[in-house]
């Protein structure tokens, strides 16, 4: 299944070069709009369009629970995942506010919440009722991982077919910085203690406990560094796999992916492991305060647009960064050239 959904074309370098040359005809000193110019070129390479568009964007939030919460690694109890899904559906969360601000299509997907959600508006694609505690057993099976990736792929394709020109992916899952940190330790080969932070706000002594939990789990589970499906099966989580699949769909459809924070970037690394060219279609929205995020961005080879000390998730940081990406496209479409403005170059 993975082979059939991970086909991605290379960037269109010719389109990028044409846009680069066109930018130099706009009424400004060469290079004076800095990274906006770089973003415009990259968007042209992604979309193969001389005047790329990122509007309207589409936001998909994947929700799932994690068995490792049993190990007291989170500041919040597991039932908050369900409560926050209801908050999304009632338009009360940060991502609702920011999605509305940027005119985004918005969707919440139950891919693995540990309870049934009987509410209007949620997309029910539950693979299982949360992952198992990876300290005691594998988080899920390989088949469940592939199902979760396929769910993400399907929801992203649906959003793209409805007209979304840029994909923003969010997550909700109490405890999900723990599997994310564990996955990053596997992919980076770096010491867990250099990667694990406070998540949504645990105390310093709990950070040490969280590090101990992850170290012990990695010894027990022994995930295969070269097999992203094995990593997800042993460590989780369902929403991480869902975002991974959505990124593969966006890349396959030449749709830009605006990355959110730490957990989203872990999904990006896994998507790159599955399809090496998928990361060509990714732009980092911001840098989280979670210590592992800096390392994850380095592995991905991305420099974030913003650095605002955010650590919320949900896709919120990417949504806040979106207007800057939009500015890069408007620069191309709406600025005058020296010739059209009658200005001496």
Image: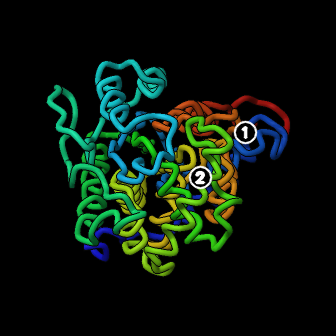
Count the numbered circles shown: 2
Q: Is residue 314 left or right of residue 323?
A: left
Q: What residue is at 25 percent from the left and 55 percent from the top?
A: 151
Q: Which residue is mark 2?
A: 209
Q: In this view of the protein, can residue 280 be seen by the observer? A: no
Q: Nearer the viewer, residue 344 or 310?
A: 310
> Residue 152 in the image: x percent, y percent?
30, 53
Q: Nearer the viewer, residue 330 or 260?
A: 260
Which part of the image, by quadrant, shows the C terminus? top right
Secondary structure under tag 2 reads helix
Q: Which residue is mark 1?
A: 26
Against 196, residue 120 (above or below) is above
Q: What residue is at 67 percent from the left and 47 percent from the top?
A: 304
Of circles 1 and 2, the one toward us is 2
> Residue 193 in the image: x percent, y percent?
68, 60
Label whose residue precedes the other's in the sequence (1 or 2): 1
Q: Nearer the viewer, residue 24 or 59?
A: 59
């Amino acid at each position: 299944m993975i082979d059939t959904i991970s086909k991605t074309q290379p960037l269109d370098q010719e389109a990028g070069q044409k846009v680069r040359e066109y930018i130099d005809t706009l009424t400004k000193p060469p290079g004076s709009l800095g990274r906006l110019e770089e973003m415009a070129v990259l968007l042209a390479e992604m979309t193969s369009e001389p005047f790329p568009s990122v509007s309207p964007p589409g936001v998909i939030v994947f929700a799932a629970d994690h068995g490792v919460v049993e190990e007291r690694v989170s500041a919040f109890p597991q039932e908050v995942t369900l409560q926050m899904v209801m908050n999304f559906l009632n338009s009360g969360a940060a991502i609702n506010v920011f999605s509305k601000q940027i005119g985004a299509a918005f969707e919440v997907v139950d891919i693995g919440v540990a309870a049934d959600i009987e509410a209007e508006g949620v997309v029910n694609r539950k693979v299982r009722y949360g992952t198992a505690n990876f300290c005691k057993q594998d988080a899920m099976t390989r088949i469940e991982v592939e199902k979760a990736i396929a769910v993400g792929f399907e929801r992203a394709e649906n959003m793209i077919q409805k007209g979304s020109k840029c994909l923003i992916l969010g997550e909700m899952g109490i405890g999900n910085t723990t599997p994310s940190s564990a996955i990053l330790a596997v992919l980076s080969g770096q010491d867990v203690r250099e990667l694990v932070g406070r998540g949504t706000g645990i105390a310093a002594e709990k950070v040490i406990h969280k590090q101990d939990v992850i170290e012990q789990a990695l010894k027990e589970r022994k995930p295969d560094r070269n097999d992203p499906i094995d990593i997800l099966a042993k460590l989780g989580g369902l929403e991480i796999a869902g975002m991974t699949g959505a990124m593969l769909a966006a890349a396959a459809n030449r749709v830009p992916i605006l990355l959110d924070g730490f957990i989203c970037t872990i999904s990006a690394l896994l998507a790159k492991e599955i399809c090496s060219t998928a990361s060509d279609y990714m732009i980092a929205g911001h840098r989280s305060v979670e210590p592992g995020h800096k390392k994850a961005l380095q592995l991905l080879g991305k420099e974030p647009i913003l650095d605002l000390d955010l650590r919320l998730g949900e896709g919120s940081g990417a949504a806040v960064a979106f207007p800057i990406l939009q500015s890069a496209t408007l620069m191309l479409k709406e600025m005058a050239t020296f010739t059209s403005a009658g200005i001496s170059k």
